[in-house]
Image (tube, grey):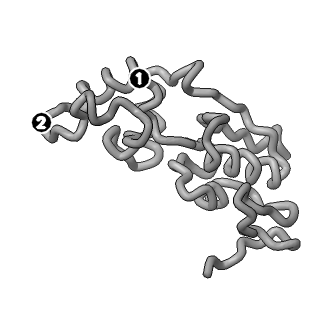
């Protein structure tokens, strides 16, 4: 099925949420195209396309924690989208992760369970790294408490 169901994940291997999303994609029987966006950032045109498909604005994907967000003053409402895109191009760490593109759409997958909207059914049980069970033995999402 992976040939007919291409999935791209903009991934940071140091991020637990991103690793959980990657695990859920693989649990659906798909080997995704993994883009380590800190090493290979998306072009401005590609990022704009992904945002349009996700129904997001560039400010919606800005990561604040562990980034130069505050030092760059990116919370200033006077900044234009062009200003934000320029900052993201210089500092790809500003892109919130993981962004996932599939034939079903594009989503910023935070929390990691959001990726389930983009995938075929899960093939079995799945636990997040923290031990939280989010998919049961039949591949069905588990309702959160």
From the viewer's perspective, is the residue at label 2 or at label 1 nearer?
1
Relative to 76, is 115 above or below? below
- Using the image as rendered, state which of residue 66 and residue 125 is in the foreground: 66
Residue 47 position within the rendered picture, expressed as x and y whole percent measured from the top left: 45, 30
Point 74% across, 38% down: residue: 32
Point 82% across, 54% down: residue: 27
Label disc, if present, on residue 78 of the rendered structure: 2
* Numbered circles on residues, count: 2
Which quarter of the picture shows residue 112?
A: bottom right
Q: Is residue 103 left or right of residue 125?
A: left
Q: Is residue 121 left or right of residue 67?
A: right
The secondary structure type at the circle numbered 1 is loop
| Residue bearing mark 1 | 91
Residue 22 position within the rendered picture, expressed as x and y whole percent measured from the top left: 72, 45
- Using the image as rendered, state which of residue 90 and residue 67 is in the foreground: 67
Relative to 137, is 115 above or below? above
The crowd level at tag 2 (other Cα within 10 Å; few <14, some 14-19, many 20+) is few
Q: CA distance from mark 2 to mark 1?
A: 20 Å
Residue 98 position within the rendered picture, expressed as x and y whole percent measured from the top left: 57, 43
Which of the image's four quarters has the C terminus? Answer: bottom right
Point 32% across, 24% down: residue: 87
Relative to 130, is 48 above or below? above
- Using the image as rendered, state which of residue 22 and residue 3 is in the foreground: 22
Toward the left, the furthest residue is 78
The crowd level at tag 1 (other Cα within 10 Å; few <14, some 14-19, many 20+) is some
Label disc, if present, on residue 106 of the rendered structure: none
Residue 108 position within the rendered picture, expressed as x and y whole percent measured from the top left: 51, 48
Which quarter of the picture shows residue 123?
A: bottom right
Q: Are marks 2 and 1 in contact (CB under 8 Å)?
A: no
């Amino acid at each position: 099925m992976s040939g007919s169901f291409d999935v791209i994940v903009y991934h940071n291997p140091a991020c637990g949420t991103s690793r959980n999303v990657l695990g859920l994609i693989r649990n659906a029987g798909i080997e995704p195209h993994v883009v380590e966006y800190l090493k290979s950032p998306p072009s401005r045109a590609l990022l704009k396309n992904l945002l349009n498909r996700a129904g997001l604005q560039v400010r919606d994907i800005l990561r604040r924690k562990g980034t130069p967000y505050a030092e760059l003053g990116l919370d200033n409402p006077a900044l234009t989208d062009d200003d934000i895109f320029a900052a993201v191009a210089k500092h790809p760490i500003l892109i919130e992760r993981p962004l996932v593109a599939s034939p079903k759409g594009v989503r910023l997958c935070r929390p990691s369970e959001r990726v389930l909207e983009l995938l075929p059914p899960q093939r079995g049980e799945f636990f997040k790294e923290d031990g939280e069970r989010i998919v049961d033995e039949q591949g069905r999402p588990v309702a959160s408490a």
